[in-house]
């Protein structure tokens, strides 16, 4: 039983399909312990999984025992890692909904009754055809892979000799390509920056308040222990501003010691 | 072989890709299309009857010389050439849908496969197997995808008509008409089991 | 030709490089060196006497099949005359990104399109539409790509400033995340004419 890392299935363009059938039969043995190991590449999507369950159960596709199939589908999906299971969840929800609809008593007129499974059956049949075509393509591709074309390219001549055929591409083509890139490009990650202006004025008021009570204050008097960066910056700028205006004197006893401030206005006017 | 056959052989031999009929016709401006066709027959005959390691096959609207499959294993063992990787099931399914329903939009492909198709479509485009062929009507004018000459090459097809016809498949692939009846029939029957 | 000669022919045809005697010997472990030498003689004889478009030549320690030189000119002429080629949608998208964002590294192009760009960049280079124009700062000093005079000529532009909505799109075509700064910087520079 091969176990693949949870690579996003949709991005895999290459794969090994020959292993498919034997893998299916052995999957049940590991499904219980498969919580973090996934055999996902085996299934190319929810319809593939559903079709395989129906085939395993050997039930009539026009009369799917939804309760049983939904239960098994959910069991398989719950064994998948979250990012891999995402693509299967919508189908899981759909199955549960159909199951509920079937349990509800139908309306009076049986003529008007529509099987809630009809749409699912249509999609499964459609998907089944895709699988048939895939079988044909797979056979053709294997036949072609078994033949080599000539790959030799004379090194000395090659570089200056690219495809010299004239190009038929217009500016309009180029521009619609720009358009496509813009439409298909992943949405840019936009960070909402909440503007939180520094409250320098508020910090200045706080410092002045401390100095009306005491002649000397220190950093911890005006900066709370759990202060946010903007608050710290505000106090810092406020101190510089007050020093510039000559209202306070800043001092540090030694490098990295707490900043102390004294009321310059008082000391100047004794 | 005759001079024209030798010239065509040299041109086919020199190319890693199939050479379109048109380009073959331009090799010797004095030769008619019938003469070119006859020379191609001569090469093919010669390869087959005289015992060569290669054969001449027709792919898309052109011709290509390929090795015979019986030598592949030995060549790969000697590490002189490697077979290309297989396409994944997801890629093949997407290609199958595109091949039969082109031009087709991404939303429709996703609807049929039940999973997102964005990354796969990009990879197929990158590999040259499918490409944007136009824009649909309706909201946002969705991009429509189709198969390319490389697709034919990859599966050694002359044209899409060589794929099984839709009505040869178990159920017709164009669901809008074909499957409707079956689905309606199913819809009218009350469930036998829940 | 005999079976061993056919096998050697197929291997020589499929190999991307001249094949050394040693590798030829590994193709069929049961054949002696003398048998291999005889088979090579058989192929060469056959090509020469029977009139083929290619010949078997020995290069250094190895062997390869090459087209006969007298056909080279006709093949090149036919290639030129072949009908115009359309760029694939993927190639156009890559070219568009380069045109509006140059100089731009491969990683950034891949980030914008979400798929590998190696093969496409190579073919755009081969076509002469884009080329390496420098190296970026930062890890590994990545190659930076830009458009070429052939690009301008092809789209009948005098300079890149004539691209529609140049300023606006240079900003819009930024990758989803990262490189924001570099992109902004690039957007602020007027498009270089090449």
Image (cartoon, coloured by chain):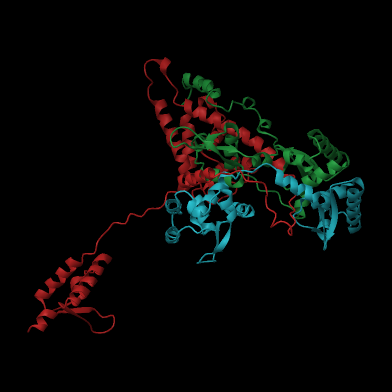
Chain colours: A red, B green, C cyan
Residue C111 in sight in this render: no
Query: Which of the 4 image quadrants contains residue A131?
Result: top right
* Residue nearest the viewer, comparing B137 with C188: C188
Where does residue B57 sit, x and y in percent of width and height? 76, 39
Position of B155 compared to C163: left or right?
right
Position of C60 compared to B134: left or right?
right
* Residue nearest the viewer, comparing A209 with A239: A239
Q: Which residue lies furthest to the front in this view?
A: C158
Position of A174 compared to A90: left or right?
right
Where does residue A220 sit, x and y in percent of width and height? 21, 73
Where does residue A141 sit, x and y in percent of width and height? 68, 41
Position of B15 compared to A202: left or right?
right
Query: Which of the 4 image quadrants contains residue B26?
Result: top right
Q: Which residue lies furthest to the left in this view?
A: A270
Where does residue C137 sit, x and y in percent of width and height? 50, 66
Q: In this view, does C47 lie above or below A141?
A: below
Residue A164 in sight in this render: yes
The quadrant of the image that shows the C terminus of chain C is bottom right
Q: In this view, does B112 lie above or below C169?
A: above
Q: How many marks?
A: 0
């Amino acid at each position: 039983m091969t176990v693949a890392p949870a690579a996003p299935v949709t991005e895999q363009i290459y794969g090994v399909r020959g292993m498919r059938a034997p893998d299916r039969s052995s999957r049940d043995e590991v499904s219980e312990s498969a919580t973090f190991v996934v055999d996902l590449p085996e299934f190319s999507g929810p319809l593939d999984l559903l079709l395989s369950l129906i085939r395993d159960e050997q039930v009539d596709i026009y009369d799917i025992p939804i309760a049983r199939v939904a239960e098994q589908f959910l069991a398989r999906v719950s064994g998948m890692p979250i990012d891999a299971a995402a693509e299967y969840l919508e189908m899981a929800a759909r199955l549960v909904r159909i199951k509920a609809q079937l349990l509800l008593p139908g309306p009076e007129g049986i003529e008007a009754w529509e099987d809630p499974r009809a749409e699912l059956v249509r999609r499964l049949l459609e998907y089944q055809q895709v699988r048939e075509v895939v079988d044909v393509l797979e056979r053709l591709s294997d036949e072609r892979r078994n033949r080599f074309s000539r790959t030799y390219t004379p090194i000395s001549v090659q570089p200056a000799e690219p495809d010299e055929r004239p190009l038929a591409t217009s500016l309009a083509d180029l521009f619609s390509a720009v358009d496509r890139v813009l439409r298909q490009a992943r949405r840019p990650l936009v960070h909402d920056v909440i503007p939180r202006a520094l409250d320098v004025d508020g910090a200045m008021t706080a410092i002045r308040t401390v100095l009306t009570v005491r002649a000397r204050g220190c950093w911890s008097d005006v900066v709370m222990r759990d202060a946010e960066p903007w608050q710290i910056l505000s106090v810092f700028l406020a101190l510089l501003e007050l020093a510039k205006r000559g209202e306070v004197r800043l001092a540090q006893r030694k490098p990295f010691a707490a900043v102390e401030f004294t009321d310059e206005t008082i000391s100047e006017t004794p | 072989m005759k001079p024209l056959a030798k010239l065509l052989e040299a041109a086919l031999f020199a190319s890693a890709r199939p050479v379109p009929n048109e380009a073959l016709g331009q090799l010797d401006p004095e030769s008619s299309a019938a003469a070119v066709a006859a020379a191609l027959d001569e090469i093919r005959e010669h390869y087959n009857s005289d015992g060569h390691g290669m054969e001449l096959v027709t792919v898309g609207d052109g011709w290509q010389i390929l090795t015979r499959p019986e030598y592949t294993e030995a060549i790969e063992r000697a590490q002189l050439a490697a077979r290309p990787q297989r396409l994944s099931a997801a890629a093949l399914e997407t290609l199958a849908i595109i091949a039969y329903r082109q031009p087709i939009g991404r939303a429709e492909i996703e609807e049929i496969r039940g999973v997102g198709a964005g990354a796969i479509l990009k990879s197929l485009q990158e590999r040259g197997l499918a490409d944007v062929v136009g824009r649909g009507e309706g909201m946002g004018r969705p991009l429509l995808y189709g198969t390319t000459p490389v697709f034919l090459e990859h599966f050694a097809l002359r044209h899409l008509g060589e794929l099984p016809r839709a009505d040869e498949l178990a159920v017709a692939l164009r669901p809008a008409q074909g499957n409707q009846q079956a689905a309606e029939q199913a819809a009218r029957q009350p469930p036998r089991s829940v």
